[in-house]
Image (tube, rainbow, N blue to C red):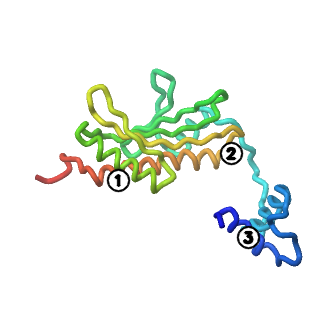
Amino acid sequence: MGVFDRGRRWLGRRTAPAAEVPPVEDLTDAELQDRVAALLAAELGPAEPGEEHPTSVTPARIAAWMTDHDFSYFVDNDGDLGGLWRGRLFYFFLFGERSEILQVRGQWHREASIERLEEVLDLCNEWNAERIWPKAYVRVRDNGRVHVVSEVAVDLEHGATDAQLGQLLYCGLSTGSMLFDALDERYPDPAGVAP
């Protein structure tokens, strides 16, 4: 029995005895969605409409969030919005035909030698296998130095409320910092280590 089948059986048991409603397998998609909504309402309480409607994400909204939270930011020569968070450089990009994909991209403030490429790749792969955010990867520069990058991207085709946008920005910054903290722990700065 697959995970989906077990989930359908669990859902059928949780909502009502089998004698009162048809088995989950016999429900249409709309009926199944209604049953899921009823289960969520019973478990979490009824949904309350938000006071705010999602709107398009713009660089101005991102900058306003930064200002509201006392984060300094800059706009570089290419017009990209960036800032420092705990001493690490992060950029905030909007991609897609309608600039609907928000990406928070961070860069570790240190670099590794090319000889450490394999072990840094292993660390990134391990991170990606165990965590949802951020995506971790490396870039090898022309000078042979290895830079580690964090990335959180989300499709906001239908926009985001201020609270949602703030949560996504904070997610990108905080999870990127967690990755960089793990790198700092694995590779202590020689200047910070006593001889």
The x, y position of residue 19, in whole percent, is 87, 78
What residue do we see at 36% from left, 41% from top? 108
What residue do we see at 51% from left, 52% from top? 132
Label 3 element class = helix
**Residue labelled with disc 3:** 9
Viewer-proximal residue, 104 or 163?
104
The x, y position of residue 80, in whole percent, is 50, 28
Query: Label 2 crowding class (10 Å Cα cut-off): few <14, some 14-19, many 20+?
Result: some
**Residue labelled with disc 2:** 161
Hey, what amino acid is under mark 2?
Thr
Distance Cα–Cα, label 2 vs label 1:
32 Å
**Residue labelled with disc 1:** 182
Query: Label 3 crowding class (10 Å Cα cut-off): few <14, some 14-19, many 20+?
Result: some
Which of discs 3 and 1 lies nearer the camera? The answer is: 3
The first of marks 2 and 1 along the sequence is: 2
Hey, what amino acid is under mark 3?
Arg
Distance Cα–Cα, label 2 vs label 3:
36 Å
Distance Cα–Cα, label 3 vs label 1:
41 Å
Viewer-proximal residue, 99 or 139?
139
Question: Does residue 189 appear to the left or right of 122 in the view shown?
Answer: left
